[in-house]
């Protein structure tokens, strides 16, 4: 064999080794063809249905490349391993005969039926709609094996819809018996030996401030006067890591979920109720274990010194936000002096934060009034009032202080792997057209530095407040922003204008906060540990957070469609919230329900074209313009619950 040919064969072999196995996420199309989507730029891998191994849509897999087109670089492969399942619980129907049962999933993605052993039917019968869990699927099994978790109520469409959203997003709908048993075994008494290891704050005035319907109170504020112009303010956070030990089945389940999901009529929790609502919830008149940041401050809210460590507290009172807001407005009520002083400090902290470059985007959220069957009978817009800001500012202060503290620590001159919460600078490609658009309303941006851009945003938001263009400028401004994520690469938090930031204050509902507590524990003990898997844990937490946000958005959309379904044919005032070549979106003023006015419904009036730079649709003959931010009247013409879609038509002259 010639040296030239040998060299060529060696090159070919090296290439095969390089692309032999690739890790990625399986995306299955409706036609049944799959693509393993990879993070790097090496290209996705096509996988045919017979080569899925035991993988399902959304699973993280390893794929072996068996073909590669030298000209196009397109690859084809076979899945060899399922690294992580996206979804283990499914909704569908049972087919039961005398000796065997099968579960047929309700999904538009190709998926095999589950074989259900007769002893795993859990009381379900033929044709019942159920939730089933994938229990086992070995590579030699013809069918995956499942178990019925629960039976769906036949006439409860809402329950089915919410469960379907959670299941499709990869969130388990229940905890297994083993997980619940492990939680039940946790000791619910606090012994004196544990208290002796902590700062005892039980005699200090302490209270919680939460939504009126909250059950898991994971943060409390303690307050006492130390002298003239000298105060001690403690931010005490439920010590979940005391109960949730690494590598237990309970911990693995919490990591898998990574977050609680808040839907209009339910919470899908990260932790079993024994932990979230009992052991760790900072309920009034009970001793509770906490992780805390205790600040010494003056009346201007300036931090003179701080202490970080473990505490034991005894909450004196449980406030709802509405209670505290009333005290702030009337200057009267329980613990009024402390509440009013804390509020003054919070407002000073808030003002200082914005003066240093934090961006003051306001946001409106919706809350649904539900009847006993979870049917929406009203929609209320949630406002951020001073009571909310009081808690927000002290939580931000604690989060920032913990991150700053960890950033100073090193192991062998290397930074400690830590789940920072970061927010990148605005996307320049999105920012440039927005700046040109804002200029039409007289808002000039200074783009010389990131800080100057933030200052320009705040000036614009202040100037636009109360004006017709306020909503559109806020909406479009938010779209220029990057998404906040968890990562060990600390680039700071642009939106908050913090150099160091993390999530420390909500470990009952967020796994990254548990990770922060664990790192902090090792640092305080003088034995900091370098968790090599921290980057992977950060990535997983960010992905689960995104999935939860999309699930929550879909849940809200479902309820909005359900609400307006009872109002089809009625006319409402709305604001144009988006434009596209196929029509424009309108959000109702009173309910924040977004629907589409299609270009087809406008065709009798004029032929409209999209002007992207102006975020508008313009009629060719009439010159009629539909622009983002415009107020107009719409009629609800259709409300499709299955698609979570609202269709409107423009009402001329209303």
Image: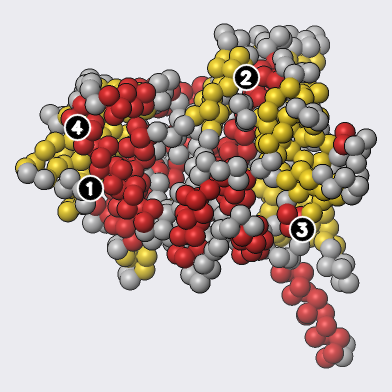
Residue positioned 45% across, 41% down in the render: 511
Which type of secondary structure does the marked residue at label 2 adopt? strand
* Real-space Cα separation, disc 1 to disc 2, in angstroms: 52 Å
Quadrant of residue 165 within the rendered picture: top right
Which type of secondary structure does the marked residue at label 3 adopt? loop
CB within 8 Å, label 1 to label 2: no
Q: Whole-percent x and y of residue 27? A: 76, 46
Q: Whole-percent x and y of residue 153? A: 67, 10
Q: Nearer the viewer, mark 1 or mark 2?
A: 1
Q: Whole-percent x and y of residue 526? A: 23, 56
Quadrant of residue 332 within the rendered picture: top left
N-term mark: 2 or 3: 3
Disc ID at residue 44: 3
* Residue labelled with disc 4: 338
Which type of secondary structure does the marked residue at label 1 adopt? loop
CB within 8 Å, label 2 to label 4: no
The residue nearer to you, when weighing 567 against 531, is 567
N-term mark: 4 or 3: 3
Q: Classify 10 Å Cα crowding around label 1: few (below 14), some (14-19), many (20 and above).
A: many
366 displayed left or right of 357: right
Which type of secondary structure does the marked residue at label 4 adopt? helix
Q: Whole-percent x and y of residue 308? A: 23, 48
Q: Nearer the viewer, mark 1 or mark 3?
A: 1
* Residue labelled with disc 1: 301
N-term mark: 1 or 4: 1
Q: Classify 10 Å Cα crowding around label 4: few (below 14), some (14-19), many (20 and above).
A: some
Quick one: quadrant of the C terminus? Answer: top right
Quick one: quadrant of the N terminus? Answer: bottom right
């Amino acid at each position: 064999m010639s040296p030239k040919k040998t060299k060529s064969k060696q090159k070919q072999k090296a290439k095969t080794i390089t692309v032999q196995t690739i890790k990625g996420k399986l995306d299955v199309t409706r036609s049944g063809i799959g693509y393993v989507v990879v993070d790097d730029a090496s290209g996705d891998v096509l996988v045919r249905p017979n080569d899925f191994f035991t993988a399902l849509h959304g699973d993280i897999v390893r794929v072996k490349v068996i073909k590669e087109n030298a000209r196009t670089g397109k690859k084809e492969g076979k899945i060899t391993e399922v690294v992580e399942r996206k979804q283990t619980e499914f909704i569908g129907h049972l087919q039961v005969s005398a000796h065997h049962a099968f579960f047929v999933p309700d999904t538009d993605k190709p998926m095999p039926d589950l074989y259900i052993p007769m002893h795993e039917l859990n009381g379900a019968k033929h044709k019942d709609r159920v939730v089933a869990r994938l229990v086992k699927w070995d590579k030699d099994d013809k069918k995956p094996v499942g178990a019925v978790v629960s039976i769906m109520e036949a006439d409860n469409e809402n329950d089915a819809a919410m469960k379907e959203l959670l299941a499709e997003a990869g969130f388990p709908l229940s905890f297994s018996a083993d997980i619940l048993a492990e939680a039940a075994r946790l000791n619910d008494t606090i012994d004196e030996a544990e208290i002796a290891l902590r700062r005892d704050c039980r005699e200090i005035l302490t209270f919680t401030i939460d939504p009126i319907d909250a059950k898991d109170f994971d943060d409390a504020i303690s307050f006492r006067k130390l002298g003239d112009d000298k105060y001690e303010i403690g931010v005490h956070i439920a010590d979940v890591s005391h109960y949730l030990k690494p590598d237990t089945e309970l911990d693995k389940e919490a990591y898998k979920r990574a977050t609680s999901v808040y839907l209009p009529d339910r919470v899908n929790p990260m932790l079993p109720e024994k932990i979230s609502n009992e052991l760790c919830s900072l309920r009034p008149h009970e001793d509770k274990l906490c992780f805390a940041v205790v600040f010494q401050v003056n009346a201007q809210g300036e931090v003179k010194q701080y202490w970080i460590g473990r505490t034991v507290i005894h909450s004196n009172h449980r406030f709802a936000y509405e209670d505290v807001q009333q005290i702030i407005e009337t200057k009267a009520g329980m613990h009024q002096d402390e509440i009013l002083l804390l509020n003054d400090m919070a407002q000073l902290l808030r003002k200082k934060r914005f003066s240093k470059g934090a961006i003051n985007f306001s946001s409106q959220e919706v809350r649904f009034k539900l009847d006993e069957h979870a049917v929406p009978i009203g929609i209320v817009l949630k406002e951020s009032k001073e009571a909310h800001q009081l808690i927000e500012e002290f939580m931000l202060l604690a989060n920032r202080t913990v991150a700053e503290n960890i950033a100073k620590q090193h192991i062998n001159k290397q930074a400690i792997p830590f789940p920072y919460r970061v927010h990148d600078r605005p996307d320049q490609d999105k920012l440039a057209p927005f700046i040109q658009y804002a200029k039409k309303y007289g808002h000039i941006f200074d783009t010389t530095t990131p800080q100057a851009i933030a200052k320009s945003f705040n000036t614009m938001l202040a100037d636009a407040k109360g004006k017709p263009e306020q909503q559109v400028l806020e909406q479009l401004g938010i779209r220029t922003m990057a998404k906040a994520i968890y990562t060990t690469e600390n680039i700071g938090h642009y939106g908050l204008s913090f150099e160091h930031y993390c999530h420390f204050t909500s470990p009952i509902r967020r796994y990254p906060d548990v990770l922060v507590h664990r790192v902090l524990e090792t640092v305080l003990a003088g034995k900091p540990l370098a968790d090599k898997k921290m980057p992977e844990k950060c990535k997983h937490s960010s992905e689960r957070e995104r999935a939860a946000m999309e699930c929550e958005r879909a849940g809200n959309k479902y309820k909005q469609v359900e609400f307006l379904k009872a109002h089809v044919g009625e006319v409402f005032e709305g604001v144009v919230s988006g434009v596209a070549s196929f029509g424009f979106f309108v959000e109702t003023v009173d309910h924040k329900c977004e629907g589409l006015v299609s270009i087809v419904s406008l065709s009798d009036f004029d032929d409209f074209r999209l002007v992207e730079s102006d975020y508008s649709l313009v009629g060719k003959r009439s010159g009629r313009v539909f622009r983002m931010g415009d107020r107009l009247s719409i009629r609800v013409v259709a409300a499709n619950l299955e698609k979570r879609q609202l269709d409107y038509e423009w009402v001329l002259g209303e």
